[in-house]
Image: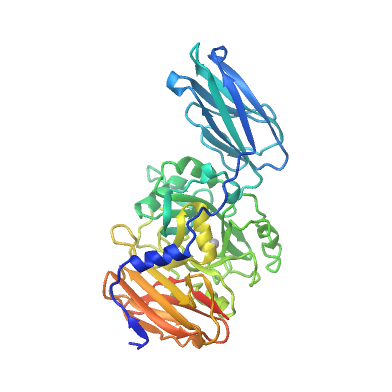
Amino acid sequence: MPNNIFSRGCRSARWVVSILLGLLPLAPLQAEPLPDLVLQASLNYADHQTYRRVGFDVPPGVARITIEASYTGSEERTVVDFGLIDSEDQLVGWSGGNKRLFTVSAVDASPSYSPRPIRSGRWNVLLGIPNIRPASISELTLKVFFSRSLDISQEPAALRAPLKAGAGWYRGDLHTHTGHSDGSCPSLSLRKLVPCPVFKTADMAAQRKLDFVVITDHNASSHANAIRELQPYYDHLLLIPGRELTSFFGHATIIGTVKELDFKPHSPEQGWDAALAALDASSFVSINHPVRPSGEFCMGCGWRGPLPNPHLQGIEVVNGDDLGTPYSGLPFWQQALDEGHRLTAVAGSDNHQPDQDAANWGALGRPATVVFASELSQIAVIDALRKGHAFIDMSKALVTSAAPKIIELWAEVNGAQGMMGDLLTAKAGQPILLKVKVQNAQGLHLHLHASPSLKLPAEIGAVTGAEAAYELKAAAPTGKSWVFVEVRDAFGKLVMMSNPIYFQP
Ligand SMILES: [Zn+2]
Ligand SMILES: [Zn+2]
């Protein structure tokens, strides 16, 4: 056992909490977009059992309209129903009295409404007033939000409320397919395989106790409309509409937007730069299964695009059960790391059959990417992925009854603290204090993978308790360096890996 491990064993969780509170911003990640219009109307008995329109002008360049309605007088049994009429006088939808928040875009819409391109011009909120008493007056307010793109950052806060408040480790699958591309499952009568509906993926993800699942159909965002309907029901499972950009020269997961992107690069050199340049900082793009051979078995699966690439933030280092096979993306990521790139290591099941047994290749939820996010919301998960605040759990056993495994890596240099994914300034010779904490990893072995210049031991040792913490010291080298933690089983097989902490003078 290396002698620079000067403390180990079970610790109070308190230092972790104090580090977290000291380091991570608990404030909202983005300012709440204000409504573009606030429309008001006064209703009285003359409106009883009538329909009214409240018109508003939609300027060019709007990609999504979201309406939040409220009115006074419910205690006097005033009831207002809502619908929406577009600039061509077509009914977009009618939700009656059952929704006071609804959204419409070309890709997705709240149930009761149909997706459609947002054309500029005069739109109307259609009101129905089934009841208002003779002496009642109801003040109606309609907040209208215009989103200029279909990036998640452009959605009003009411549409993207977190499923769970508070910073913590959230476990998810970043790569799944449904019937909106080539995901399939047996039909109800088991007579044939059919394009699998989105709820099957959501159901299995919920059964496997994931906190989030990203649906990455090939070049398709149409599942986003199903997610609008399903998300309120799955109130513990964040459903994230993603996409697997799929070309003849490589595949990549993209999350954070459902806008149209051109997936058709004409050459590997051209890549997707033109499409990806249109994304904002609320997106995350990772190369999928980068070293798969491209050919008749898997068309366009291997990555032939340029690296480094300013539009990429991650690499899928584990796809399904490919760890340890010639198709593993781990050496590809490690080479990028050695070359000085900071790309978040992520994993995904690439599940195409949500019903398939957990023992099979690509079972949903295995491997899992576990992120340290400020809350369980799409924006917070993406923010954590971009920062590299994430580890990969490749355990064969899915987290159904077993307590989830957690690995944490922290470092302190000259009073500054950072976690996996962070870059810390460390001048040559400055002491670096590394902290490793694991939960529910008894019997597994901890290894360090570090730049040789950090002179860290390769092995920490076997984990003995349900919670264990370790501290190690190193001296900062003259150049850039990095370190990440691996958790291996008794046969040396990788079970978990953290993202690196990076140091630079
Ligand atoms: Zn793929
Ligand atoms: Zn895929």
Q: State whether residue 25 is above or below residue 189.
A: below
Closer to us: 229 or 162: 162
Q: Quadrant of residue 468?
A: bottom left
Q: How many marks?
A: 0
Q: In the image, residue 82 lies at what x, y percent?
A: 54, 26
Q: Residue at x 58, y 67 (%)?
A: 295
Q: Is residue 212 above or below residue 271?
A: above
What's the image's color scheme? rainbow
- State the quadrant of the C terminus: bottom right
Q: Position of residue 424 (x, y in %)?
A: 53, 75
Q: Quadrant of residue 68?
A: top right
Question: Outermost residue, front direction?
Answer: 415
Q: Tell me where residue 277 appears, x and y as whole percent.
A: 68, 59
Looking at the image, can residue 146 be seen? yes
Residue 452 location, x and y as percent? Answer: 50, 87
**Image height of 373 relative to 89, above or below:** below
Q: Residue at x 68, y 62 (%)?
A: 273
In-image side of 112 versus 248 (left or right):
left
From the viewer's side, name the closer residue of 439 and 38: 38
